[in-house]
Amino acid sequence: MKKLLAALGCVVALAGPASAATTVDLAWGTADFAAFNGAGDLMIWGADAYVFGDTIDTPALLDLMLSFDLANPVTTATGYLDLSFGGALLLDGMLGTITQQEDQLTMVFDGLTGTAASAFGPSLTFELAFVDPLGAAPVSALVDGTSYDVVGYGAGSEAPAVPLPATLPLLLAGLGALGVRVRAGLRRA
């Protein structure tokens, strides 16, 4: 019976808690801003980044593109974030939301695809900080034709815990009944 309980403990441990979030580190990059006819584009191309998590540990190239209406940049923003390594697409996400803080943009990318998408969970939250001060609304302070030094850090949403198989309760009931029967047989002998 002790062996049975130990085996059940192993099964429960295998279905344990969620894993830690996978992260993206952009130690330094350049963001270029261009404005035309009331619209603005903020672009980062081929910036050196590093991706780290339970199932991935690799350098990567980061591409980020934001497009928005200059009159109302936060509510009209669209964009994407790509991570690649050796020509392979590790992660691609579409901008879901964006907020501004002092010298910083916080973006949530959803609809993640790519070979490493499962390591990030359903979304990636990426914080992009401008090295030079731009104020509380950095998007409004961007100047056409200017390049900005930036740093960034992102974390995937935590991966969900591995669910127990639907047949596990049946297996446990069967093992329990078997244990009771064996124990009853040992008492008779």
Image (spheres, rainbow, N blue to C red):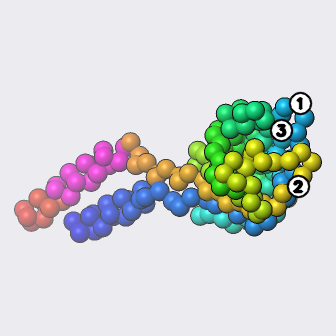
Asked whether residue 21 is in view, the answer is yes
Q: Earlier in the sequence, mark 3 or mark 2?
A: 3
Q: Amino acid at mark 3?
A: Gly
As drawn, 53 above or below 164: below
Image position of 92 (left or right of 54): right
Residue 72 picture location, percent across and down: 71, 33
Q: Quadrant of the N terminus?
A: bottom left
Name the residue beneath numbered marker 3. 40
Residue interval drawn in magenta: 167-181
Q: Residues within 10 Å of mark 1 (few under 14, many from 20)?
A: few
Q: Are marks 2 and 1 in contact (CB under 8 Å)?
A: no
The residue at the far right in this view is 145
Q: CA distance from mark 3 to mark 2?
A: 13 Å
Identified at 78% across, 62% down, the residue is 132
Asked if one can make out residue 49 in the rendered structure from this viewpoint, the answer is: no
Q: Which mark is residue 6?
A: none
Q: Residues within 10 Å of mark 2 (few under 14, many from 20)?
A: some
Q: Which residue is mark 1?
A: 37
Q: Which mark is residue 147?
A: 2
Quarter holding residue 2: bottom left
Is 125 on the left-hand or right-hand side of 161?
Answer: right
Task: Using the image, determine if residue 18 lies above or below residue 92.
Answer: below
Which quarter of the rendered picture does the C terminus lie within?
A: bottom left
Residue 146: say if magenta: no
For disc 3, the neighbor class at 10 Å (few under 14, some 14 to 19, many from 20) is many
Give yes or no for residue 170 being in the magenta stretch.
yes
Residue at the image position 62 percent from the left and 63 percent from the top: 53
Residue at 74%, 60% (x, y): give it. 133
In this view, the residue in front, 105 or 28, is 105
| Type of the residue with mark 1 | Asn
* Residue 171 drawn at (x, y percent): 32, 49
Q: Secondary structure at mark 2?
A: strand
